[in-house]
Amino acid sequence: MKNRADTLMIQATASDAGKSLFAAALCRIFSRRGIKTVPFKAWNMSLNSYVTKNGGEIGIAQALQAEAAGREPEVDMQPILIKAMGDGQTQVIIRGKADKNIYYSQEKKDYREIFAETIRNSLQKLRQENDLIIIEGAGSPAEINRSGPDFANMFTAEIYNSPVLLISNIDRGGALASLVGTLKLLSEKEKKLVQGLLINKFRGDFELLKPALGFLKEYTGKEVLGVIPYLKDLNLPEEDSASLKKRSQKNCSNKIKIGIIRLPHISNFSDFNSLKMEADVYLEYIEKAQSLNNFDLIIIPGSKTTTKDLDFIKRSGLAAKIKLAAQTGTLIMGICGGFQMLGRSLYDKHQTEGGSKKMEGLNLLPIDTEFLPDKTTHQVEAVLNNKLEKIEPFSGFDFNKNLKGYEIHMGITKYLEKSKPLFELQKRSGEKVKIMDGAVDLEGNCIGSYLHGLFDNDSFRRSLINYLKEKKNLSLNKEKAKSLKNSYHDNLQKELNRLADIVESRVDIDKLLNLSRRS
């Protein structure tokens, strides 16, 4: 290993251009070559997060990039995480720990020196321990309306003069103009850091694109180092909720239909990636009450602002439809904030969420929740509560199977009458515990848990799908039986390798490696 790591930074002309997955591809490519590689993103705003082994919170994209690099996620991979709470407020997370809620306008004014020092320290630590750091920017480096340092982009690049690759999404149109315009808006110092351009999500005849690539080099003086094709059906966790597109309703009559409520402040929708890989599961995100019909399972996901999203569910008419579905036998499930919403009452005497001090829940689970100022973040190991063996839908589940997940919540939940816990937590952040989590109503058609990552456990996911198939009188065909044998972890590795193989074949990787050595 070197005394200090080389660095290479990926910036983009806009959000959702493909920075995160391209960075993941590079992490996998270079780690396969025996280079000790690590991801880094200085500053990020996201509601999709992951918990490290020591209980720190980072963005899901950096956790995926760490997986691609064969590394354990750690807080120095993303030292600053910002979570939007609505109404101009954000929660600031520094090196994995929640600091406080502030208005967005305060963020850089109050935290400028803290952010700068934290970013430098984390980057320096990673540089001392690795051979190569793949740095991801955020949004665009040319947002001239921003005041103060752009921590996510050029501020970080300038720390060690990291070579920058500028990527643009051609599938949306205007990629060439975006690349040219972004470079025009950069200062001369910043422009010199940009060492190459990338075109992402290209469809069509490459020969027709060649003249444009020549124009870019001639006009900007920057070479296009790769053109990455549009990758259909790539099943990897995404960070941006813009990726939650409706899927076609065609040919879903013989599938299990799962409806996920698309909350305004939805968080950790990466929980459902493992369900997407199952051939006999149809997944749809629902925003309107009139669309919530004929589902076999309805899931209320995690939320950054539970009370505001609960209010949305009530005002939109979704609450009434969810209750009606529960009465007619549809399985209802809540995860984290969704679990809290399913209860009788939610109390916020500390004004953790800044709304009313008491709010009525959907009253589908006999539980009460009290929000607290301190956030709970743990990796956990759990087993199903063995008292549920005779209650549907759990009769076919493996009660001895160890399950893994993680907690990210602010509050505690109390059990009322006629309620049973769903899980027994046996480890929290590596320490042995015996804590009950989640709840099940005695009818068995409403369940909830604080645990994220539940469906990534193959045994739990398959058992739930099998129960829903039997309930719907669906039989397995050969293709579907094969899909149920899939391991989510194996599928994740397969998809990361597929992504890396394609990028490696379309991008001048050796040139990128040589560029990194200039930092």
Image (spheres, grey):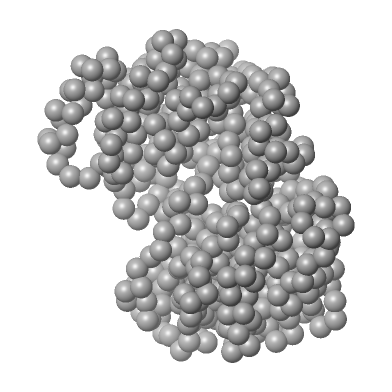
When the figure is inspected, residue 52 is found, relative to residue 467, above or below; the finding is above
User: Residue 483 is drawn in which quadrant?
Assistant: bottom left
Residue 248: image quadrant is bottom left
Q: Of residues 304 and 510, which is closer to you in this image?
A: 304
Task: List x then y, in percent, for residue 262.
Answer: 54, 62
Left of 167 or right of it: where is 338?
right
Vertical side of 458 occupied by 398: above or below: below
Whether 367 is drawn above or below 452: the answer is below
Q: How many tags in the picture?
A: 0
Residue 97 horizontal side relative to residue 222, left or right: right
Q: Is residue 484 left or right of residue 346?
A: left
Q: Is 361 left, or right, of 320 in this rendering?
A: right
Q: Position of residue 195 (x, y in %)?
A: 36, 17
**Quarter of the image with the N terminus in it:** top right
Which residue is located at x 68 percent, y 42 percent?
A: 90
Q: Residue at x 34, y 25 (%)?
A: 181
Pick whichever, 321 or 127, lies toward us.
Answer: 321
Report the residue at 77% width, 52% height from top: 354
Image quarter of residue 201? top left
Q: Indicate the position of residue 300 as horizontal and vertical percent values.
A: 61, 67
Seen as rendered, the residue at the extreme right is 349
Percent from the top left, x then y, of residue 92?
Answer: 70, 37
On screen, residue 518 above or below 47: above
The reply to whether residue 507 is in sight is no
Q: Residue at x 49, y 12 (%)?
A: 161
Whether residue 213 is visible here, answered yes or no, is yes
Closer to the camera, 510 or 183?
Answer: 183
